[in-house]
């Protein structure tokens, strides 16, 4: 064998061995789902507090480039709603108010993310309660396409909840304050 032939044979053998090892490792990992969080146990949202926070975060998270108005966000979480909110989410209204920046956010490809948390110092909801009212603070941030962020005014919201079967659902809400005064 000539020297170039030997080099080619060794290189080919090494490549085949590397591919065999990669294949063996990949095939040996059948119990794991690559690229997912299927191995993580996520507790369902079940308490009145959790539902109030999740519903307000969902209602206040928008993608103006693909949504016509904030109604789309309300509609997207309709499985967590009942009463007046479920009615409002069930069919698109002829007109729905949008923030004045909506069109510029849409053109720029910006997203508005609503982060919510339960306001402090609230009485706990009793286990046998059929209704509850929770105060939730929402902080929205505009995520710009270039990576910058802009905070919007903080909002405090009174959320009315009803137990439907074993599940809590948001029935209505109203803004109690907008801006830094809480």
Image (cartoon, rainbow, N blue to C red):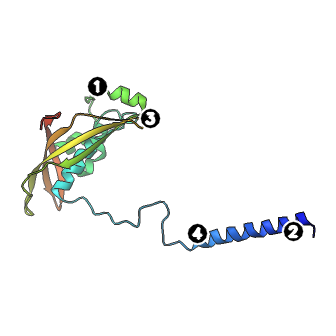
Q: Which residue is located at x 17 percent, y 62 percent?
A: 166
Where residue 146 is drawn, which disc sits there?
3
Residue occupied by mark 1: 100
Q: Nearer the viewer, mark 1 or mark 2?
A: 2
Q: Quadrant of residue 5?
A: bottom right
Residue 6: assigned label: 2
Cα–Cα span, label 2 and label 4:
30 Å
Label annotation for residue 66: none
State the SS at label 3.
Answer: loop
What numbered label is drawn on residue 26? 4
Q: Along the horizontal axis of the image, is 1 left or right of 84?
A: right
Q: Are marks 2 and 4 in contact (CB under 8 Å)?
A: no
Q: Residues within 10 Å of mark 1 (few under 14, many from 20)?
A: few
As measured in the structure, the alpha-carbon distance from the residue carrying label 3 to the one carrying label 1 is 21 Å
> Does residue 137 sit above or below 93 in this rendering?
below
At a point 32% along the width and 63% down the height, the residue shown is: 42
Q: Position of residue 150 (x, y in %)?
A: 32, 34
The CA span between labels 3 and 4 is 37 Å
- Left or right relative to 27: residue 96: left
Please report whichever mark, 1 or 2, sits nearer to the chain's N-terminal start. 2
Q: Quadrant of residue 4?
A: bottom right
């Amino acid at each position: 064998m000539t020297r170039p032939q030997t080099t080619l044979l060794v290189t080919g053998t090494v490549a085949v061995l590397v591919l065999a090892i990669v294949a063996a490792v990949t095939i040996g990992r059948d119990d794991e789902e690559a690229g997912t969080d299927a191995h993580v146990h996520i507790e369902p949202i079940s308490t009145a507090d959790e539902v109030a926070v999740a519903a307000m975060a969902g209602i206040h998270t928008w993608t103006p480039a693909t949504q016509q108005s904030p109604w789309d966000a309300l509609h997207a979480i309709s499985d967590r709603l009942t009463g007046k909110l479920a009615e409002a989410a069930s069919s698109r209204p002829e007109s729905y108010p949008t923030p004045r920046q909506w069109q510029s956010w849409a053109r720029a490809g910006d997203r508005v993310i609503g982060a919510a948390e339960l306001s402090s110092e609230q009485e706990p909801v009793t286990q046998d309660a059929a209704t509850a009212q929770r105060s939730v603070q929402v902080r929205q941030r505009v995520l710009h396409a270039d990576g910058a962020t802009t905070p919007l005014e903080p909002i405090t919201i009174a959320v009315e909840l009803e137990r439907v079967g074993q599940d809590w659902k948001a029935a209505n809400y109203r803004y109690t304050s907008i801006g830094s005064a809480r």
